[in-house]
Amino acid sequence: MNIPKTSFPRVVIIGGGFAGVALAKKLAKQEAQVVLLDKHNYHTFQPLLYQVSTGGLEPDSIAYPIRKVLQNFPNFYFRLANVEEIDTENERVITNIGDLDFDYLVVASGSVTNYFGNTEIEKNSMAMKTIPQSLNLRSLILENFEDALLTSDLNERNALMNFVIVGGGPTGVELAGALAEIKKGILPKDYPDLDTRMAQIHIIQSGDRILKGMSEIASQKAEDFLEKLGVNIWKNVRVTNYDGETVTTNGELLLNAKTVVWAAGVKGETIKGLNSEDFITRGNRMVVNEFNQVKGFDNIFAVGDIACMKTEDFPHGLPMMAQPAIQQGEQLGDNLIKLVENKPMKPFEYTDKGAMATIGRNKAVVDLKKFKFQGVFAWFVWMFVHLFFLIGFRNRMVVFVNWVYNYVRFDREARLIIRPFKNRNIE
């Protein structure tokens, strides 16, 4: 990898997500050599992926070059690599571009879509965890409407215009709201020779309410917002199969749709050599202690979605969201310096800053520790928070200008088929 030898301890970070970047920034000015490995050369702001999928934003406005984040720090190195295995005995990372020894290893590989073993659903549905996947979904949606113009079969046409979103969490809810607004304000103008009123948007939720990670009032208000937008919500229904044409459930519900988005869950992205059943738990996550050390190791850590830190408030591990990842990355940066200096590390304590979701124009729900509110004010809070956590001044400005333009014009001009998706399978 051409990483120079140094007298400083070498910290290898796997993954440039929220946790990995927060950790690297914390260590960048310290007496440590920091090497960050990722299969992409950019950091993705995942909470806004659904806006790329629905033409509200271009992908470069929610991505930021990893090298630029830490370009002014002399002891920081980035390598574009796919990590294949961890040799824990020899303290070595094995990648597709070579091997690298480490003094301290931090796994921040994040999460991937969890299909719960259903290969048929995995083959035929769409995921939305990466920018390429979001671009694929955008292309598929637009291509299906182009195909709907060409068919004289009414059932086929309706299936091409129907959307099924499996999972009623923030991702599913926000995507459904965006699609409902496209149906209402954009499709009739883009496709005047199609009866776009026939397009249907469905959310299928296995539990008894959507946004189950938020308060009941937030769940109910989000449901009210979606129903007013014309979204069909199916609760206590579990999808059992999707063959590319028909969505099958555990009940009598059958839905014909050419676009199915799987947002029903995620799992940790483990790495060979660190996937032992001794420390892999529910959700394919690594069990860590209060210092983010992986069970059984002193110099191997895990942060973010891949890490399962169980607490009294979170017996199944901290939520797989941006805030726990950022806080863990920053705290571990301080702890690694303490560890190098033979000082006692500080246990991690999660500060729950709340949760939020937007359901479209002027509609959002926000749960803070002491306050819960919904509607227009919540929508402004949601926008401010997301702008604040975007990396890079340019990205903040571009997203803000896009949002203002889309709001004033009721438009989404990034509805472009840059690359056809059908018959392609890009991760």
Image (cartoon, rainbow, N blue to C red):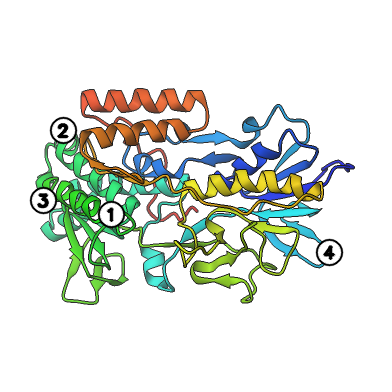
Q: Nearer the viewer, mark 4 or mark 2?
A: 4
Q: CA distance from mark 1 to mark 3?
A: 33 Å
Local crowd at mark 1 within 10 Å, few (<14), some, or many (≥20)?
some
**Foreground pick, 224 / 166:** 224
**Horizontal placement of 12 versus 261: left or right?**
right
| Residue 196 disc label | none
Vertical comparison of 48 with 165: above or below: above
Of circles 2 and 1, the one toward us is: 1
Pointer 3 residue: 198
Which residue is labeled 1 in the image? 215
Residue 102 x %, y %? 80, 53
Q: Is residue 244 left or right of residue 202?
A: right
Residue 295 locus on image (x, y percent): 66, 68
Disc 2 to disc 3, C-alpha distance: 15 Å
Q: Helix or strand or loop: what does disc 2 sit on?
A: helix
Amino acid type shown at disc 1? Ser
Of the residues under marks 1 and 3, which one precedes in the sequence?
A: 3
**Residue at image point 21% right, 52% down:** 217
| Residue name at image x 61 percent, y 59 percent | 290
Task: Point out which mark residue 189 bears.
Answer: 2
Report whether 285 appears left or right of 410.
right
Which of marks 4 and 3 precedes in the sequence? 4
Q: Tag 3 or tag 2, which sits nearer the N-term?
A: 2
Q: Nearer the viewer, residue 383 or 333?
A: 333
Residue 90: mark in rendering:
4
What amino acid does circle 4 point to?
Asn
Q: Amino acid at mark 3?
A: Met
